[in-house]
Image: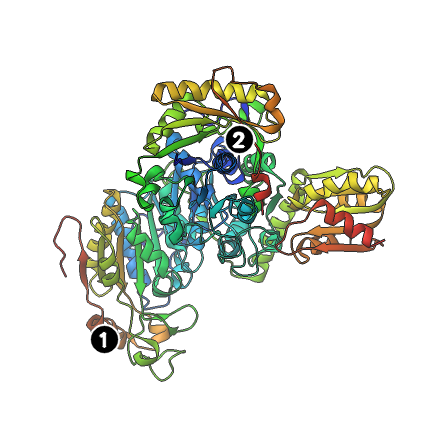
Amino acid sequence: MRIVEAFVGEYASGKSENAINRSLELLAENHKVTLVDLDTVEPFYTLRPLKKDLQGMGLNVIAWSPEETMGLGEAGSLLRQEMIWALKNEGSIILDIGYGVHGANIFNLIEGATSDPDLKVYAVVSTARPMTATKEDIVEYIKDLGKVDGLINNTHLGNETTPEVIEEGSQIVTEAALELGIPVIYTAVSQELAHQFPGTDKMGNPIKVIKRFMPQAFW
Amino acid sequence: MSEKPVKGSRRVFMTGNEVCAWAALAAEADIMYGYPITPQTDIMQYWTRLAPKYGRKFLQTEDEISAGFTTVGGVIAGKRAFSATTGPGNTLFQEPMSMAEMMRIPTVVIIPQRGGPSTATVIYSQQEVTMTTFGGNGEGFRIVYSTAGHQDLYDYTIKAFNTAWKYRFPTFVLGDGYQAKMREPLTIYDPAERGIEMVKTEPLVGLPGTPGVDRPVQYLRNTYNTEEELYDVVMSIAKDYEKAAPEIMEWQDFDTDGEMDVLILAHGVVSRAAQGALPLLKDAGIHAGHFRPITLRPMPEEQMRQAAAKAKRILVVESAYGQFLKLVKEALYGMDKPIDTLLRPGAGVTAEEIVHRIQEGR
Amino acid sequence: MTREKVALAPHMPKCWNPDTKPHKFCPGCGHGLALKMLGEAIDELGIQDKVVFGCDIGCSLLAWDFFNVDSVQTHHGRTTPVITGIKRARPEIIGIAYMGDGGGYAIGAQHLVNSATRNEKVTAILINNTNYGMTGGQMAPTTLPGQKTETTPYGRDPKETGYPTLGPEMVAAIAREGAYVARGSISNLRQLKKYLKKAIQNQMDGNGFSFVEVLSSCPTNWRTNAEATWSFVEKDMAEYFHVGEFKVPGLKEEK
């Protein structure tokens, strides 16, 4: 089955992390996987520096490498041809999409995105970010984004994350999802805390154990 | 007045630039003027998203010269005005900031340093130390806080407004591209909750009444006719600056109590590498301490000298080719201490590199 | 005070600061006339308590304590952004930026252009005397073709240094609805005052950017006597720089 998923979200919400983990998960299930970096607004802290490692694991990664783009930050919103045609790749496709004021309009730049029957858009939400800290803020934010098929609770405080932080986030994200009429796809939990979450979180959302890659992406 | 942007206090996780925008909101900043330049731009992006919700204003100017002078104008009008810039933009800011020095205009500017000279990189450096502390055709009558992470960015952005308005010197929050873009947890809070009272702002023009009729006219200038006249003005600013300096200076000591084999001097985010190096050095049998000036202007020279006096050698570490080193040499002038250096212009420094440098030097 | 002295006292606008008069501009300089019209405009509009006057570097600097209105002297070319910053922070203030042709058309041209395109609610007044007066008569953006200055000792050669800047024409071309743009002259003070009043009123009405260039004189650097001075302003300059309104809110553009 062809899986096409886009992970969208605010800076530091954890969309790249979730996109990478999802790609590797599909790879382990013998999918052919293309991972696309479409973080056009926020050129830092994208998966670019991880490109080589991820390709070594067997992913087809469409992203700039840091050495390819002079003055990378200034050139942050460069698209390359392969990005526009990303959905034409064989197999499953995971899109890591940066936030911008135009929200989900970035799909207008990707050939076939608006008509792709398989495309699911998941918004990665962390209530540790003040702009998406309350149910009301999340609802407003998601409505602004456009098409969103589900929420991912990725509430965390980096190394200070505790099960309580995650559960508190889950409650708020779940309430927002209810109001929006869309599901919570899962609650993300880092490997270190996985043992504290057997099965589901307290709100009944599935748990996805996330291996952290992004701290290595720091230049 | 609109609702408070930050109520109570809470633990959050975000980028450094976002922290600055929230801190300026919490500090009751009224207006930001700015021009886009990486890695500063998201301070403006967050401010423009948040400010209208709390009745605050923004102007995107035609360049950084204008960003600096409009900020000066906003402060003259009596508003808590600020800007943010870096690199070549900081260069252009030096002209308006020299006017702010001369006219005692309490501007606040946040500077996430990028690589230089010239356009260089948008990533990271500590190469704007000389320019930010002593730039323009001025005498360095400025206050410069060098932050080392997100909590610092929040705390010192708020503090910058109060220091600026209390002492009436242009004040800078000197960060860097790493701090701007990295993500880490911090506590954001309503300053009032911590007993921090925002210093009241005062207009220099547009006062109540009719000038020359029922109140004196406000004539503001930075031009003087004679050497004597200028000398008196500059000396009086210098006197005020020196008087305020001890109240403004901030620093941190790490393991500097006893005799040290080496004292590591570093500021900003590099201080975190220095702090990380201390336990590694201890394991290697080297007694090292670390002194971090938080204010680069005014420099806590006496405190640095006291720490240096207890060490056999000094190691200066910075992501620049000797800009902080120059300030250190001035502070330690006359002391008989060998100074080693680890200078990495435009590049990050790790704890391991510091350890290696110290072991290599033995 | 004796009767004679009272009788001799010149009429001064109410908002002028009498303590700084007589002013320090050279005899025959047009600044004093322009500032007198500005003073009368302020008086007639009744806004002495609301104006913030910003002045540039160059001879306009000498106006820093000219009025009994709050005043700020800035850097060369930077008066427009300082006044813009004040106005943005405190919209109830009436901001007047006063500058010379060097400040407005050369070193601060980007600020004039961008304030105009943003339609900043400020009033910019620019004195065009075809040279840099305070620095001793060098070429300005407005120096006429063939005109001798200290840096064009053989006369301005447009092939080498271009043609004089047509400021109001430029501003009128880039400014949009709500902007007021005019060029007046010290040789027609009633008209100049009318333009200045409209330029300030336009700001008070919240319409947009207002800009008045004033054709002015600099006999000291021109090395002209009274007759030659007036002739230069009224003939040579007026021939190149057309006096009139270039943009008036609510009206079709007129010359």
Percent coordinates x, y for residue C60 in the rendering? 38, 60
Amino acid type at circle 1 is Asp
SS at mark 2?
loop
Q: Is residue C16 above or below residue C244?
A: above
Percent coordinates x, y for residue B125 in the rendering? 60, 52
Picture residue at 31% right of the left edge, 68% below the top: C129
Percent coordinates x, y for residue C22 in the rendering? 37, 59
Horizontal arrangement in the rendering, residue B187 relative to residue A136 (left or right) = right
In the displayed orientation, state which residue is furthest to the bottom. Answer: C154
Q: Nearer the viewer, residue B77 or A99?
A: A99
Q: Is residue C34 above or below residue B173?
A: below
Residue beneath disc 1: C236
> Where, by quadrant of the figure, is residue A152 drawn?
top left
The chain ID associated with circle 1 is C
Label ID, residue B198:
2
Picture residue at 57% right of the left edge, 19% below the top: A197
Q: Is residue B160 above or below residue C244?
A: above
Q: Is residue C157 visible?
A: no
Callout 2: few (<14), some (14-19), or many (20+) C-alpha neighbours within 10 Å?
some
The chain ID associated with circle 2 is B
The mark lying in front, picked from 2 and 1, is: 2
Amino acid type at circle 2 is Met
Q: Nearer the viewer, residue C3 or A52?
A: A52
